[in-house]
Amino acid sequence: MGFLDKLRGTGHDPAPKTILAAAVPMSGPGVRTFNRARATSTTDQWQNEARYYYDVIGELRAPVVWIANAVSQADLHATDIDPDTGKPTGPSDDQRAQTVAMQAFGGPSQRAGLLRTVAICWQVTGEAWIIIRPGEPQQPDTWLVLSGDKVRSKGDSWQYTDPMTAAAITLTAQDRMIRVWSPHPFDQSKADSAVRPALPILREIEKATQNIAARLDSRIALNGLMAIAEELDFPKGDFQTSSESFMDQLLTSAEYGLSNPGQASSQVPMAFQAPGELIANGGAFAHYDISTQFDGQVVELRQDGRTRLAASLDMPKDVAEGTQGESNHWTSWKVEEDTYKIYIETLLKAIGDAISEHWMQPALIAMGETAETAKLREIGWDTTAIVARPDASETLESLYDKVLISDEYMLSEHGVPEDAMPSPEERTRRMLEKLVSVAPTLLADPAIADALNLGLEVAPAAAGVDANVTPGGELESPEPAPARALPSTRSQEPTPEPVPDGLVAAAELIVFDALSRAGGRLLTNQNRGQFKSTPREELHTVIQPGNVDALMEGSFQFTDRVAEAFSVEPARFQDSIRAYTGWLLSTSRAHDPEHLAFFLRKLW
């Protein structure tokens, strides 16, 4: 059953409380009274002219439709109102209120189209008429949005022009009609819009366009005047004068050339005879251009009109000029957010207030709620699809890597459900895989190989491992060999000797060089100048690295000489330095001599 069926006989007074919307009486003397006031306030011809220019001036239609399309993306819900402040507190938990709200504007299937029509009417003529008709038993109500010129009174009732059949439909006392309008500040019963003061500008744009089109047509019909000397020796043929015969021959030659552009004959010039003195003086015939200086200014005048129109419309200038798509991704989101807060939010609030007061709240009262409770419900808007926010993914990833935000928050900000999180076992395995990818020598640790289900059998003494890696990637203090070592050999393992300080110091220089190179590659035009206080070798801790291998390309040039000086195998030394540097870059960690010593201990 439609909600309007529930309103019959409730005795609810639909008197408006805001000037932005009014519920229109459907029958009786009130129709004539309302229509007289309406006739006084809407007989101005500016609305008809505004509708005309919306149809013929693309510079007006395009930005209006852009705003309307944004409005159509808004979703609605029932929201509660704080009785003390009168402000909405968020979506309502009342299921009945949510059910009523979901039926507004014909439900989800029709809502976008109707909201778009309301937004266009609001911007162009300053008003829209919402008609709600009860459906058949067990059927939803029918919603229509019409322009003011499609609604008229007939005696003690109202008629409207059906948008599908163009038939005149008479409204009954069971129907409901709501006028939503932007009030004129000096006569608030009249509608107002930004198009009204722009009408003179629109006239200029139209006339300039017509002038340009007329001049194009005139150039096709007559491209200036040509004077031909009487002394020109050209046979008249069937014509009365030589000039007429000459022009006929000229047009015939041009037509042949255009129809045979690829043939050599089309390039042969047309020949005629003329007295030598005329040719010597550049005479024989002359062309007169009939264009005026004003012709060259019309295009500029039209562009000036477009600029003034953009400044007049009630929307951001870049939207009015059609240049909003040219903004780069660093600033375009702000334009859209400003557009919503200043322009779109006002319209949505006017629509929501009108539907709340004149349809939703009466429907809730008819369904059993008290008037006091119903007044604490209204239509709220979900603008997620309208307002674009800045891309904070890089910032979130940086905070997440530094363990400053939780897994749950990271998932919610990216719209990923929590049940998509990996299990603890899978998380451990994947983190170990990431660590091993930058430090393959860690596979010598039997515990890591076992955690990765690789089935590797490595002798503890040969592995040379004296530190463990936790699932979080942190290095722990040296511990005894893994439990997989045989009890009989566990006490026989030699104590590893410390890495010489000289080797660590030399390796540090190589690491700092590689990190500095990587830091220089991380500085782009977008972030240059933002991290002046951060040393170049630590830029990877504040700028999320991308391809680690690319960042390290060209580094580690002197590892062979250092390896020879300390009598270690050059290839293994370079692998250890490369694995350590890649680990720092991929985990956004700063250099730590103890961590470096751990990676070098396998060599000693």
Image (cartoon, rainbow, N blue to C red):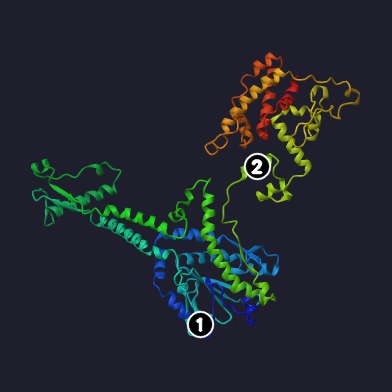
Closer to the camera, 419 or 504? 504
Residue 47, image x and y in percent?
42, 70
Dividing the picture into quadrants, the one containing residue 431 is top right
Q: In the picture shown, does residue 319 fall above or below 569? A: below
Residue 210, image x and y in percent?
32, 60
Residue picked out by circle 2: 397
Q: Helix or strand or loop: what does disc 1 sit on?
A: helix
Q: In the picture shown, does residue 52 fall above or below 224? A: below
Total of numbered circles in the picture? Answer: 2
Quarter of the rendering occupied by the N terminus: bottom right
Q: In the picture shown, does residue 440 fall above or below 110? A: above
Mark number displayed over residue 515: none
Q: Is residue 264 left or right of residue 236?
A: right
Residue picked out by circle 1: 31
Q: Helix or strand or loop: what does disc 2 sit on?
A: helix
What amino acid type should be assigned to the residue bearing mark 1?
A: Val
Residue 397, image x and y in percent?
65, 42
Residue 511, image x and y in percent?
65, 25
What amino acid type should be assigned to the residue bearing mark 2?
A: Glu
Q: Is residue 110 left or right of residue 367?
A: left
